[in-house]
Image: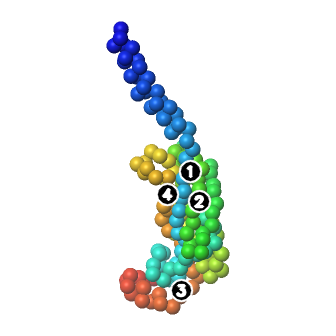
Amino acid sequence: MATSRVLVILALCVLLPSLIAGEYAAAKPQHYEVSGHVFCDTCQLGCEHPLSTAVADAEVKIECRDRKVESLPVVYTRYGKTDKEGNYKIEVLEEHKNQKCEAVLVKSPLASCKEIVEGLDRATVILNEQNGISSLQRKANSLGFRRESTIDGCGKLYELYNYED
């Protein structure tokens, strides 16, 4: 009889705090921070390179689409802007488990570097807990606009990268 009481008390001492902590963790809202960089492809190479420049005040958005629907409709959008170094941080207030989320270029403030090119225009961002990432900070790949004409010095980069039109 005394043994069963001890077991009940022991169970309460061990399990009750675990249950309370579990409830608190489940109720805690997820605030993800997506960060990235926006550049101008000054040599039209299709990638970031030593002559690329940062794009300040570029508009970027986080866009999430529903994976369960074949047409992948947009179900979440959050906008942000880059700082003077071309970096952005966008806070996403909740988890997006069954959604495909991306950082997407919206608009460049530079008249000479505003072309949005497929491949540089978006980067996938995972915004759920079930992926092995313990941090709530997410780093997106760099996004880039293409300059309408190349700058001086690109010829040396073309040679370095064995680039041919």
Residue tagged by mark 3? 150
Which badge, 3 or 4, is on the more N-terminal residue?
A: 4
Instruction: Please tell me the numbered disc located at residue 108.
Output: none
Residue 67 percent coordinates (x, y): 53, 47
Q: Gap between marks 2 and 1, in whole Å?
A: 10 Å
Kindly report which numbered mark, 3 or 4, lies closer to the viewer in this rendering. 4
Residue 29 percent coordinates (x, y): 57, 44
Which badge, 1 or 4, is on the more N-terminal residue?
A: 1
Amino acid at circle 3: Thr
Q: Quadrant of the C terminus?
A: bottom left
Q: Quadrant of residue 86?
A: bottom right
**Which residue occupies the extreme top position in the image?**
1
Report the front residue among 67 and 61. Answer: 61
Residue at (59% x, 56% y) in the render:
91
Residue tagged by mark 1? 31
Which badge, 3 or 1, is on the more N-terminal residue?
A: 1
Instruction: Please tell me the numbered disc located at residue 138.
Output: 4
Vertical order, 70 against 145 (above or below): above
Per the image, label 1 sits on a secondary structure element best described as loop
Per the image, label 3 sits on a secondary structure element best described as loop
